Image (cartoon, grey):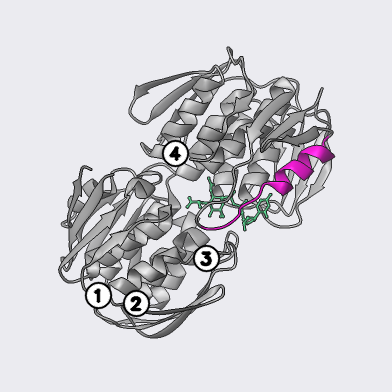
């Protein structure tokens, strides 16, 4: 397994580009199952989860061409299977996003239940309940969900809690259903709007994406199109924190600041200088004296749970005490024990973590656990004095494109040790 070796203490400086959003590219690839025509996606990030999704689509019988590193051409005209096997689903929960498209277009899907992961149980009960409301028969046998429907029927679906994946699965399923579907209490993330933009280009009839009520008029068929994936707002936020925690100065390009206003507002409030140069460029300047401030993760447009670990790491270097409240997932403080090994003053009580700073961090050997926790360990290593080793960096490779190369290009002393 690859490791990262980091020598901390260098302020980052220079310009770095953000890649396409992993959490938009994943549902957009799955959406290609809804048509026999070719769907071309640009700005697809070169990360492990997208390689996994591409393999899943190929296993279902799709042809996936990659004429350029970040362009995927998917043709689902030859799909001859409807099963997402456990071997793939257990490595990437987002495999469940093929459930809605397969049932909608082929009337059948067999998807292994994803099982829990490091940050929580993450069931898909709301996905299944909503598909049943649209007339699907759902059976669970040997850990595999078997969903069938002659043709899904439009319905009013009210999610009892906001679910990004559930909204995406049902949005895709409803495009080919008979009649109108309304998704109520829908997720409002930019990735939902990006998916809806793609689906409408394919001939779907969707209104209200990005709000909590999405209306879909079902159509009989969808066609091919081309689409460019939005920038990754979480990578953008991670890079802002990298500049802040090293007291550096970064120009962050190819981003969309409108997709992370809650993050930018919070980081400005603690003292990070963030200037929006133009629509796709931020100029960030870290300062040595940051002020600690509480944060609670919320559904979009609130402070995203995917930025919690990165923000918590920054708070270890801020003056005073901050309470970080994780309200979305039940176990998303895996990074805390690793940060404590570097010297951070952190205490977890239930779904809250209390940070007291600033505490000087000194390098140590760490183990990555989940994607965003692992990114926070890289940030901590950049700030720590001395040498930090991070094992199991495949967690990071799932959602960040060559993060060590990007960071090295702006002065970080970080290298990947092939294992
Ligand atoms: C998506 O996961 C993202 N993944 C996650 O990003 C992100 O943290 C999460 O949304 C929240 O923003 C992708 O987009 C691929 P949810 P998802 O359904 O769809 C509960 C990353 O780091 N729930 O909104 O799985 C669930 O347990 C990843 O890139 C149910 O109880 O999240 C959780 O507590 C990590 N039943 C909460 O809702 C359901 O049927 C939010 O989950 C569905 C969800």
Dot 1 or dot 4, earlier in sequence: 4
Dot 1 or dot 3, earlier in sequence: 3
Check disc 4 and report its element: helix, strand or loop.
helix
- For the residues labelled 3 and 4, the Cα–Cα distance comes to 24 Å
Query: Where is mark 4, residue-wise?
Result: 49
Query: Where is mark 3, residue-wise?
Result: 303
Dot 3 or dot 4, earlier in sequence: 4
x, y (%) of residue 3?
A: 24, 50
In magenta, the rendered stretch is 119-134
- For the residues labelled 1 and 2, the Cα–Cα distance comes to 9 Å
x, y (%) of residue 99?
A: 66, 33
Q: Which residue: 39% across, 73% down? A: 268
Horizontal side, residue 134 vs residue 164: left or right: right
Q: Is mark 4 within 8 Å of ligand 1?
A: yes
Q: Nearer the viewer, residue 160 or 145?
A: 145
Question: In this view of the protein, can residue 246 be seen by the observer?
Answer: no
Q: Residue furthest bottom?
A: 320
Check disc 3 and report its element: helix, strand or loop.
loop
Dot 4 or dot 2, earlier in sequence: 4
Query: Where is mark 2, residue-wise?
Result: 316
Which callout, 1 or 2, points to the residue nearer the camera? Answer: 1
Check disc 2 and report its element: helix, strand or loop.
loop
How packed mark 4 is, by other alpha carbons closer than 10 Å (few <14, some 14-19, many 20 or more), is: many
Residues at circles 3 and 4 in contact by the CB criterion of under 8 Å: no
Query: Where is mark 1, residue-wise?
Result: 361
- For the residues labelled 4 and 2, the Cα–Cα distance comes to 30 Å
């Amino acid at each position: 397994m690859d490791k990262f070796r980091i020598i901390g203490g260098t302020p980052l400086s220079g310009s770095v580009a953000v890649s396409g959003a992993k959490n938009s590219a994943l549902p957009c690839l799955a959406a290609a199952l809804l048509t026999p025509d070719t769907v071309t996606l640009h700005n697809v990030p070169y990360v492990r989860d997208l390689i996994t999704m591409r393999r899943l689509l190929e296993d279902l019988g799709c042809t996936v061409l990659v004429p350029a590193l970040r362009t995927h051409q998917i043709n689902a005209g030859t799909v001859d299977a409807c099963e997402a096997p456990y071997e793939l689903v257990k490595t990437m929960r987002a495999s469940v996003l093929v459930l809605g498209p397969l049932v909608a277009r082929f009337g059948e899907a067999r998807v292994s239940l994803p099982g829990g992961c490091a940050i929580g149980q993450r069931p898909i009960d709301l996905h299944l309940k909503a598909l049943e409301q649209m007339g699907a028969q759902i059976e669970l046998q040997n850990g595999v969900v078997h969903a069938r429907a002659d043709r899904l029927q439009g319905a009013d679906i009210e999610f009892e809690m906001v679910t990004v994946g559930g909204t995406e699965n049902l949005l895709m399923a409803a495009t080919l259903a008979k009649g109108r579907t309304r998704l109520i209490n829908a997720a409002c993330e930019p990735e939902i709007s990006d998916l809806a933009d793609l689906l409408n280009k394919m001939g779907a009839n969707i209104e209200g994406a990005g709000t909590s009520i999405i209306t879909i008029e079902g159509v009989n068929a969808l066609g091919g199109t081309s689409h460019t994936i939005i920038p990754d707002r979480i990578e953008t936020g991670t890079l802002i924190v990298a500049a802040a925690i090293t007291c550096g100065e970064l120009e962050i390009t190819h981003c969309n600041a409108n997709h992370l206003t809650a993050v930018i507002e919070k980081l400005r409030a603690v003292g990070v200088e963030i200037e929006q140069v133009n629509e796709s460029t931020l100029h960030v300047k870290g300062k040595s004296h940051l002020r600690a401030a509480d944060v609670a993760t919320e559904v979009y447009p609130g402070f995203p749970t995917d930025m919690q670990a990165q923000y918590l790491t920054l708070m270890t270097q801020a003056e005073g005490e901050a309470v970080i409240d994780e309200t979305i997932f039940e176990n998303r403080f895996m990074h805390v024990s690793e940060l404590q090994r570097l010297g951070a003053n952190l205490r977890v009580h239930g779904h809250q973590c209390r940070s007291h700073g600033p505490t000087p961090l000194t390098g140590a050997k760490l183990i990555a656990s989940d994607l965003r926790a692992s990114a926070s360990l890289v940030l901590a290593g950049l700030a720590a004095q001395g040498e930090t080793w991070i094992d199991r960096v495949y967690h990071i490779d799932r959602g960040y494109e060559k993060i060590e190369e990007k960071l090295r290009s702006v002065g970080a002393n970080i290298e990947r040790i092939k294992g």
